[in-house]
Image: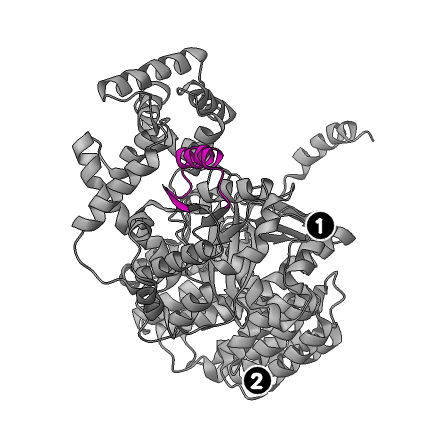
Amino acid sequence: MSVHLLGIRHHGPGSSRHVLAALAFIQPDIILVEGPPEGEAMLSWAAHADMRPPVALLAYVPDNPHQATFYPFTIHSPEWNALRYGLENNIPVRFIDMPMAHSFALENQPSAHRKPSAEQGNQEGAHRHPLAHFARIAGFDDEEEWWEHQFEIAHQPGEVFQAVAEAMTALRENRPLREDKNEDLREAFMRKSIRIAQKEQFANIVVVCGAWHVPALREMPKAKEDDALLKGLPKTKVETTWIPWTNDRMSFESGYGAGVESPGWYRHNWEYPHDQGTRWLSNTARVFRENNVDISSAHIIEAARLAHALAGLRGLTRPGLKELNEATVAVMCMGDDTLMRLIRRELIVGKVFGQVPEGTPQVPLQRDLDQLIRKYRMKVASEEKTLKLDLREENDLQKSILLHRLQLLDIRWGTIETVTGKGTFKEEWTLRWYPELTINLLEKAPWGNTVEEAAGKYLENRAAACNRLDEITPLVQSAIPADLPAALAVTMRRMDELAAGTSDIPMLMDAFVPLAQVSRYGNVRNTDRDTIGLIMRTVFYRIVVGLPPGCTGIDDDQAVAITDKIREVNQAVTILESGELKDAWTEALRAIFHSDRSAPLIRGFCCKALYDARLLDMEATYNAFAKALSVNNEPSSSASWLEGFLKDAAMVLILDDTIWNVVNKWVTTLHEDVFLQVVPLLRRTFANFTDAEKRKIAGRAKQERPGAGTVQIREIDKERAKRVLPQLEILMGL
């Protein structure tokens, strides 16, 4: 009865080749792999024809899906190839790491040393550091580079695992003493699994595990010592499933996988083990060309020569990634490594996205989402994709509804970028799927078996938990396009309750604007506009009653915030085209405008709003200027009023003759002493204009004839216009 310990580097292509060669030679009766025993029920799926790595075994607590960890596998992972070898040759395969049932339970205990996923991920990083001794002796810059050349891209003899075991034994014997209860527990469970296999009379046992654990499994203590260590460990319920993984997440340290920084490079070495760099550099040239960087065959040849020269100078048998990168920078990038970001993204890391077979065990909510994605012909991908939707098309509408429902569930697969057109008939989304979103999905599984049901119940729960109007307002905005009538009705009732007890005017104004937009245009989702309109009016009349007194006794920062909100409400009232609401709003603006106690900034904006609505003529506007900018006022007060009137209104000043005449007449009639006091105020206001707007204003000022407050009135030259008409008729085909 023999036990063969194969110490490997997680996700290492060289380690995979060594493992497969060893398995073919040993012909084991059973294969024991470092991994969570709960995942054994999912092992049969690894042999499915539609299972395409990178994939990850996801272990989670059903009652608390946030407690989860990933065990990623790539096509070049030694563990993955050991699993596939066993399944394809009908050899029993078992996972022998500490069960996640204990790991997750230990997380919830105050005495837990650290979380399993963080410990298991960081452990590899911590244990790799001792390898720096070997790297330094061999003349390498770091331990990763040393390991790559010794075990990943080099073809080692059959004694490689014996060499790894002896090296790790020496390192563990000389490492600083430290306590790591989780590691001790994990290795005790591994030894226990080996003993079980021996008791079951398996004669030829192969263990595939991280190289660091080999010494602990080589010198086995007595069984009773391990049993005493493992006695009384807490447990919790754990479930597992397979999920797609991505190359850019292979560096994500979780489970036993420590992560690798260059999964694309490792995959290349797995698929082309004999490539001396020519194929890699050819792929590099292809990526550059696809991104409009001129690269010739001569560049590839010269870069390959340089990479081999560097390898020779360093005593290496072949170029590694470091040599190939340095050659690429020197030859293809002309010494500038900026373009290497592109190579890192496209090649060194890569954009491979895995796939799991249809029918893989899933929670009902996850299954429903997968079915909807297939139904609407949407694609899950790890890179960003732009999705443009026309909501008048039924299929596009359903895609939008799905994405908005996922947003409500805090599953951020899509990020909405722009919404254009009245009635929100156009949407543009950026889609990118992260494996971690699966955890978010599992967390929402208790709310319902379908996306629609879960989103609705989750929305109702969030609405019930809102205690302020500003908490529920963004929730309503998110819920309206999600097409959840029953849940939206509950949310709107809660919003009405909160609005009734709210005296905070800015908060009411924030709530009014989105309601006004839906009430005016509706949307293609047939939202209940009557209910929304009723609540909107209730909120509106609370605003017009409380706004005028709310504009008094406030500081400058509050005045700026309220002015912005008045501007938004003013635009919303304009689009509603309701005479009743416009009249009520106008009276509120007049009350603010005529009140000397209102903040000057707000009074200035209200004056502008009333002028735009044609409720102030030129004379009244001029009088308002004269009063607000009188020398008897505080300079800061005058500056605020002028800023409120002219803020974001440069083009109005340029194109509106009335406003121009009012401002121009007021400025040209100022006494010299008063003018000198006003200049700083004007500078403060005009400083917010763009350079182009300032030039246009200056150009118009130059065209005006000087006079005692008079302005040149330019009339149409009718005789000149008559000469244009015949040519215009010819051009128009008349």
- Quadrant, the C terminus: top right
Q: Is residue 231 left or right of residue 500?
A: left
Provide residue 347's location: percent of width, then percent of height: 45, 32
Q: Are marks 1 and 2 in contact (CB under 8 Å)?
A: no
Quickly name the residue at label 2: 498
Residue 88: x percent and y percent?
A: 59, 40
In the rendered view, would you say 565 is above or below 696?
below
Front in this rendered view, residue 298 or 436: 436
Q: Give the residue type that dot 1 points to.
A: Arg
| 582 in magenta | no
Q: Secondary structure at mark 1?
A: helix
Q: Is residue 163 visible?
A: yes
Q: Quick one: label 1, few (<14), some, or many (20+) residues within 10 Å?
A: few
Q: Is residue 715 visible?
A: no
Q: Start and end of the magenta stretch?
A: 1-29
Looking at the rendered image, the disc whose residue lies closer to the viewer, 1 or 2, is 1
Q: Earlier in the sequence, mark 1 or mark 2?
A: 1
Neighbor class of circle 2 (other Cα within 10 Å; few <14, some 14-19, many 20+) is: some
Residue found at the very far bottom of the displayed protein = 501
On screen, residue 425 versus residue 336, left or right, reads: right
Q: Mark 1 highlights which residue?
A: 374
Expressed as whole percent of the image width and height from the top left, the position of residue 125 reads 30, 49
Rendered position, 257 above or below 606: above
Measure the alpha-carbon separation of dots 1 and 2. Answer: 40 Å
Reply yes or no: does residue 28 show up in magenta.
Answer: yes
For the residue pair 434 and 710, the one nearer the viewer reads as 434
